[in-house]
Image (cartoon, rainbow, N blue to C red):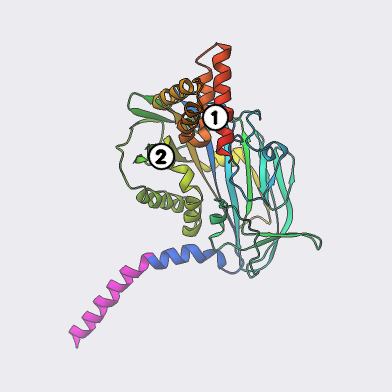
Amino acid sequence: MSMRITLRFAIAFLLAILLTPAVTQIEAQDQSLQKGRFVAHEWGTFTSVSTADGAAQYWNPLSGPTELPSFVYRSSEAARGQCIKCDLALVRMETPVVYFYSDRDLNVSVKVDFPRGRITEWYPQARTAKESINWGSFIVEPRAKERFPVDRSRSHYYPARETDAAPIRLGDEQRIEQEKFLFYRGIGNFDVPLSVRLAGDQVIVRDMRKEGIAGVILFENREGRMGWRIHGALNGEYAIARPTLGLPVESLHCEIENALVAEGLYPKEAAAMVKTWRDSWFEEGLRVFYIVPRRATDAILPITIKPVPSELTRVFVGRAEIITPEMEKDILAAVKLFNEASPESHAAAIKSVQRYGRFTEPVLRRAMSYTHVEAEQRRIWELMLAATKAGAK
């Protein structure tokens, strides 16, 4: 009899251990549904570009394809598309989305200020004043049937909907808009919390605000071969060796998702963020990802939500793109090839620089600074225009 009791106890104890992580995760995902709770979660990205010596690079984030659905609202400068002559900026504020969780219908208002930047895209409709965006009053409807807008584009906008957040409804009897979140984008001129520079085969990362950075990842993709190094928390300055290439990137997806959950996002939100950006984050180039300190996010993007949520989580990932000597060498070779008269050489030059995606433009701008010969600068500009036009097709 006693052996049976002991055996039953052992089995029950073992099951409790095995099931505890799953229960904890479910509770973390569903705690927003507790009676009377109103939760708001936000994620987004700050993308910056620097030269190998660590100098912040002005670039044109609006020069490439928008990769956004047609129903998204755009400022006049963003609506021009592939706008080479648009104003340059230091930072692209990319795809912040704000989710809401409530156990009942709730009337909510949200305003976000961007004192050192401009709002360029958003959805649903809102009042914008370049340095702020105000959605006014809208309804959080946890039990509403989802009727979200779609178009034929294969935009990375849509994965952000793959969460348990409540639908929101804006508008009046004449025009109703429904979505799973508030979405906005912008460009700005402010110092990001992390500086990066190359020193031989090492990348030197430095916490500029001395607030502590929760996690740092050095990533490189060179002609399709990828590698990374995870440093973890950063206080002060640290040298990270450039990674060995040839690793499967799927395991890095999991590492980033875990880091986002550790910062307060729900698992489905973290998965949606990685799915949204996985094509862009892991494209050709050398870059550093880091968790932006919450205090820095609140200073860059002050947010006002009424009523005040029981919980407000804001998790932004910094992306610091590095223009490497290898990239500059490739670009200068492409410029030389573009100078040749044949259509074949022009096509080869354009194809070569397009490997760097939307960062082709800042790398070519960097190349222009190497020469004071007007004719050479003009040819680099012509290559930039040609690459941008080809990328829009």
Q: Nearer the viewer, residue 64 or 380?
A: 380
Instruction: Label 1: state its secondary structure.
Output: helix
Residue at left offset 58%, top offset 12%: 374
Crowd around label 1: few <14 · some 14–19 · many ≥20 (10 Å): many
- Nearer the camera: disc 2 or disc 1: 1
* 179 is within the stretch colored magenta: no
Can residue 125 be seen here? The reply is yes
Residue at the disc numbered 2: 216
Q: How many marks?
A: 2
The image shows residue 356, relative to residue 35, as above or below, that is above
Q: Residue furthest bottom?
A: 1
Query: Which amino acid type corresponds to the residue marked 2 in the rendered image?
Result: Val
The image shows residue 164, relative to residue 59, as above or below, that is below
Q: Nearer the viewer, residue 366 or 104?
A: 366
Residue at the disc numbered 1: 361
- Residue 128 picture location, percent across and down: 73, 43
Crowd around label 2: few <14 · some 14–19 · many ≥20 (10 Å): many
- Residue 215 picture location, percent across and down: 41, 42
Q: Which residues are magenta?
A: 1-21
